[in-house]
């Protein structure tokens, strides 16, 4: 469970726990700080004893005093661990240990090493709280430490001037590490906040990316569903209608019925090819790899080649660049060409087809004209249900475009579209 955050904290406790991520790390920190402080605190008496006999001024033995000082150093180092939950308490606990040792044993010069422990606690606080709170806490530490030292000096020396002089001498020793630690903690905290902010922004960007990918996947599924609907509505309805006509003509006109059965076969092939393309798109959308891009006018050459290989004489003329067209315009125009060629193959098999596409800054114009069907492949009147024409018109009008479809004077069929570019660019 995460520790409660104190009022005014700008970073959560996880930033501080980078120092105390495990109990073992905490114990190692306490051991290092305790040993370092103990060595500094005991350096003066041990050096004096090594120099020869000394006049011991304390009522307790030197061995007992050394044990007490070592335990006090351990206690002060352990107080740093409170920074995980209560950083202010940790700072003032380290100051309190210093003042207790000062008041109990009158050894100010021995305790200089404890200043660094106070600075360490101040650093851990400054990296978690705001800069203003860190400065306020630093002032409190300096006032508490130097106030206690001054009070002790007054009682020890009995002279205020001497006490002030002694306090001024110790002021810089005590304040400099704490001030440096505070500045370093504020800088460190700012860096941690920037890293955390960058991580949050990266996570938000990832979530937004995932949402956009899911949205794009749903739109692609909707497009594929619409395409499947178009195939079912157009080709399958044509199959049923052609089959019904063949059945009705079979008793009286068997040759005509056989020809219609052949058209049923061709229509079935067209339907199968269209369904296969739509289902391959669906498979690509569900696969782990990238889905095939939506077909547009950049792939019009493939469409021409497809029908040319199946015996349709197709000529294609392009004037202008289709690569810079808005995607929805290019895709819609491709679908119109696809539908017009399918209808030409269905109603005028073998007849020549001319395709022209013109792109200007203002609009896209496309035209598909097929010649009249040959005498051996005359379409049967009344079999066109109008599914393709209606679908093309709806798609074009959604883009504020116009569509014309009608017979030519020579018996062929003419499909023209004009789609403005600027309103939807």
Image (cartoon, helix red, strand yellow):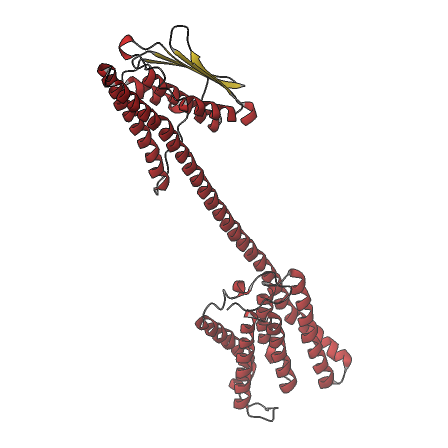
Furthest-bottom residue in view? Answer: 59
Task: Please tell me which residue lies in front, 361 or 363.
Answer: 363
Q: Nearer the viewer, residue 309 or 192?
A: 309
Q: Quadrant of residue 378?
A: top left
| Above-or-below relation of 141 to 370 | below
Q: Position of residue 45 (x, y in %)?
A: 55, 84
Q: Residue 12 location in percent, x, y?
A: 56, 63
Residue at the extreme front: 251
Image side of residue 1 versus residue 109, left or right = left
Query: Residue lying furthest right in this view?
Result: 160
Q: Position of residue 404 (x, y in %)?
A: 47, 16
Front residue of 390/190: it is 390
Residue at 47% from the left image edge and 67% from the top image edge: 21
Q: Is residue 297 visible?
A: no
Q: Residue sitting at 34 percent across and 22 percent down? A: 302
Quarter of the view holding residue 382: top left
Query: Quick one: 135 or 404, which is closer to the camera?
Result: 404
């Amino acid at each position: 469970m995460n520790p409660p955050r104190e009022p005014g904290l700008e970073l959560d406790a996880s930033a501080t726990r980078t120092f105390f991520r495990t109990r073992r790390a905490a114990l190692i920190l306490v051991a290092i700080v305790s040993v370092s402080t103990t060595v500094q605190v005991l350096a003066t008496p041990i050096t004096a004893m090594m120099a020869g006999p000394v006049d011991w001024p304390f009522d307790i033995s030197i061995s007992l005093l050394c044990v007490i000082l070592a335990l006090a150093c351990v206690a002060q180092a352990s107080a740093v661990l409170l920074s995980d939950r209560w950083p202010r308490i940790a700072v003032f606990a380290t100051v309190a240990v210093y003042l207790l040792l000062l008041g109990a044993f009158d050894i100010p010069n021995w305790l200089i090493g404890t200043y660094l422990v106070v600075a360490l606690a101040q650093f851990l606080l400054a990296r978690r709280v705001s800069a203003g709170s860190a400065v306020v806490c630093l002032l409190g530490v300096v006032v508490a430490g130097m106030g206690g030292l001054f009070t002790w000096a007054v009682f020890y020396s009995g002279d205020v001037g001497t006490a002030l002089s002694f306090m001024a001498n110790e002021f810089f020793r005590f304040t400099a590490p704490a001030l440096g630690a505070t500045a370093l903690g504020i800088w460190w905290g700012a860096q941690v906040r920037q890293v955390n902010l960058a991580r949050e922004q990266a996570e938000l960007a990832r979530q937004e990316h995932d949402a956009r990918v899911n949205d794009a996947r749903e739109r692609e599924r909707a497009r594929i569903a619409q395409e499947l609907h178009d195939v079912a509505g157009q080709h399958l309805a044509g199959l049923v209608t052609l089959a019904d006509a063949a059945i009705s003509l079979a008793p009286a006109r068997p040759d005509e019925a056989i020809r219609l059965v052949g058209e049923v076969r061709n229509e079935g092939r067209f339907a199968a090819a269209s369904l296969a393309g739509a289902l391959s798109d669906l498979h690509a959308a569900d696969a782990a790899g990238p889905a095939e891009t939506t077909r547009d006018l950049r792939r019009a050459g493939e469409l021409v080649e497809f029908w040319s290989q199946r015996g349709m004489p197709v000529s294609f003329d392009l004037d202008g660049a289709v690569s810079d067209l808005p995607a929805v315009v290019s895709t819609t125009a491709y679908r119109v060409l696809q539908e017009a060629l399918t209808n030409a193959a269905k109603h005028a098999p073998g007849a020549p087809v001319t395709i022209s596409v013109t792109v200007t800054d203002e609009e896209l114009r496309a035209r598909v004209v097929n010649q009249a069907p040959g005498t051996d492949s005359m379409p049967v009147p009344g079999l066109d249900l109008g599914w393709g024409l209606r679908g093309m018109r709806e798609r074009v009008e959604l883009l504020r475009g116009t569509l014309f479809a009608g017979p030519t004077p020579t018996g062929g069929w003419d499909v023209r579209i004009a789609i403005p570019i600027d309103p939807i660019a």
